[in-house]
Amino acid sequence: MRIRLNRLDIVLLLLIIINIINYLYPKGQGIELQHRWEDNIVYFLYAGVISLMLPSLFVRVRYFSCMCFMSWMILFYIIYAYTDGDKFNQNVVIRTFMVACSFVFFEEEIYKRKINIQLCRLYALTLFIQYSILIISENRLMTAVLNVHTVGGQSLANSVVFILPLIFYLFKSKTSTIFYLAGFIVVFISLRRTAIITYLLMLPFIYKKIVQSVSRKQAFLFLLVLCVAVFFIISKYRIIIEMRFLNLYEANSEGEYGSGRTGWLIVLLKEFVSSPKNWLQGFGLGAVSKSMSLHGYPFGHAHNGYVEILYTYGLIGFCLWFYAFVKIAVVAKKNAFRYNLKLILYLCSFLFFLISVMSGTTFLPSVLAISLCVNMIIYKDKCHVAKNEGYS
């Protein structure tokens, strides 16, 4: 039997292989800057993914044309930075480009191809397992017990959250409920406040979807297990949790809130407001990192998606990037989707907006799970294909 793979299948296969490699050869603390052979393989695989996505930028898209323009804008900034000799974090910029381009690519490919649901499920599973295992293996909770100020793993925890809409779409409600419970435990072990708060706020979106397909006894059991897990963790690590969340509403010695986030965000926003000539096009690639370093903050990004895009790409880039996530909510409201699918679309938009406030979302490859999920719902369930194939 001859197997024909289209661009969509090859991209999903490459992403699955990347997830497996990242799981087998994780980057531990202290070796992030070392040059490793497996990193080269991952870079080449990501290059393959981007090469397959690039042709989609020449195709007319309907829903995510804003991300098409954003992709061209990022490419222009890369070319300009290279010709001008500017130094910037290439990995971060390339991942940002891939996220933007993925919305255009999935829209084009899913519209004209038959989706390989098994590959999509495998992609979601490998992504979920990869980040979950990394969080558990690094034992973030024990790290917090020993040193509250050294936790880390924000991008890992947020990635677990981003995968859940795709899992709730691809798997039966009972299975996805198990994933939700497992994900909650994993996210709590990470002790990342943004991910924990976002995860708990997800419950109203998916609660009805859970209780509709499970019996009252099963729903009660699920909530009981969740409550027991929360009670056990809070009672055992109450002091650590209090210390982790305390500085969200208490200022430090410099008068900054949220682990000092408000301090560097104000610095970046003041610089932006005081430079009208940069309002439209921003300060360019690597500008956030340079400004943070200049003011003594040891970070390479703004820890806020809104400020990151605004400072780097200006008002034009800001409007293009974040209109895409407004568009998801608008599409859900205007189209005659089934109730559960509307909730998943709203959830995708809600997750991105909320996590963008306290963390960097513009360069996380896990956002591809949202772009895939959204486009699958828009084009397949709109035509009732999902119902016929029995995987909604």
Image (cartoon, rainbow, N blue to C red):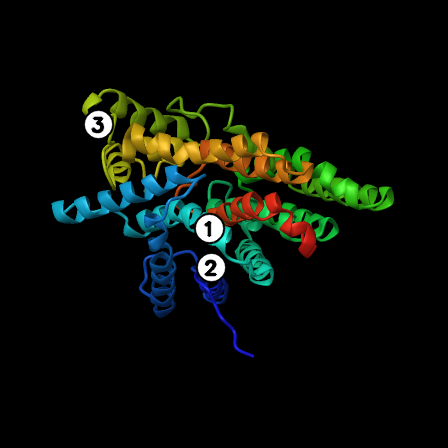
In primary-sequence order, the first of circles 2 and 3 is 2
Q: Which quarter of the picture shows residue 219?
A: top right
Left or right? Give the position of 302 relative to 20.
left
Check disc 1 and report the residue beneath it. 106
Check disc 2 and give the amino acid type. Leu
Q: Are marks 3 and 1 in contact (CB under 8 Å)?
A: no
Give above or below for 220 relative to 306.
Answer: below
Left or right? Give the position of 161 relative to 54.
right
Q: Depth check: give the residue in front, 194 or 54.
A: 54
Give above or below for 37 relative to 88.
Answer: below
Q: Are marks 2 and 1 in contact (CB under 8 Å)?
A: yes
Q: Quadrant of the N terminus?
A: bottom right
Mark 3 residue crowding within 10 angstroms, few (<14) / some (14–19) / many (20+):
some
Check disc 3 and report the residue beneath it. 278
Could you say where residue 297 lies in the image, as x and y percent from the top left? 31, 36
Q: Secondary structure at mark 1?
A: helix
Left or right? Give the position of 75 relative to 140.
left
Q: Which quarter of the picture shows residue 263?
A: top left
Query: Mark on residue 8?
Result: 2
Q: Secondary structure at mark 2?
A: helix
Q: Which quarter of the picture shows residue 29?
A: bottom left
Mark 2 residue crowding within 10 angstroms, few (<14) / some (14–19) / many (20+):
many
2 vs 3, front mark: 2
Q: Depth check: give the residue in front, 129 or 377.
A: 377
Could you say where residue 24 lies in the image, as x and y percent from the top left? 49, 67
Mark 1 residue crowding within 10 angstroms, few (<14) / some (14–19) / many (20+):
many
Check disc 3 and give the amino acid type. Asn
Q: Secondary structure at mark 3?
A: helix
In primary-sequence order, the first of circles 3 and 1 is 1
3D distance between C-alphas at marks 2 and 3:
38 Å
Q: Residue at x 51, y 35 (%)?
A: 328
